[in-house]
Amino acid sequence: MASPKGRYGSVTIHADALVYAGVFDQGAAAALPIAEGRYAWVQIVRGKARVNGQDLKAGDGAALSGIPGVQITGVDASEILVFDLA
């Protein structure tokens, strides 16, 4: 994880952004809330995953706005980055 103030021992970045990284096995799922007025970018680094109901593969990205959160499910073993942006 990366955050503006290095919270929870994360890498400090000088922007109003949070960066999350996740590794998902097939069928593993996670949810990340997104505060009102913020946006998310999801990048599939490797494998395949379902992001808010949309199947994505390695190299794909998705811009999300006006939503309360990001829902991710591993379709195959996958590695994913989520950017929570102002």
Image (cartoon, helix red, strand yellow):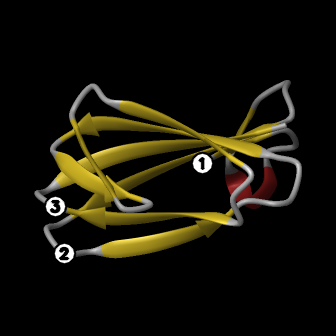
**Along the viewing direction, whichever of 9 and 25 lies nearer the viewer:** 25
Residue 27: assigned label: 2
Instruction: Give neighbour class at mark 3: few <14, some 14-19, many 20+ (Cα, 10 Å).
Output: many
Instruction: Give neighbour class at mark 2: few <14, some 14-19, many 20+ (Cα, 10 Å).
Output: few
The quadrant of the rendering that contains the C terminus is top right
Question: Residue type at mark 2?
Answer: Gly
Question: Residue type at mark 1?
Answer: Met
- Residue beneath label 1, please? 1
Q: CA distance from mark 3 to mark 2?
A: 6 Å
Question: Can you give x and y, in whole percent of width and height, for residue 13 in the image?
Answer: 77, 29
Q: Is residue 76 left or right of residue 38?
A: left
Q: Badges 1 and 3: C-beta atoms under 8 Å apart?
A: no
Question: Can you give x and y, in whole percent of width and height, for residue 38 in the image?
Answer: 81, 46
Q: Secondary structure at mark 2?
A: loop
- Residue beneath label 3, please? 75
Question: Can you give x and y, in whole percent of width and height, for residue 70 in the image?
Answer: 55, 61
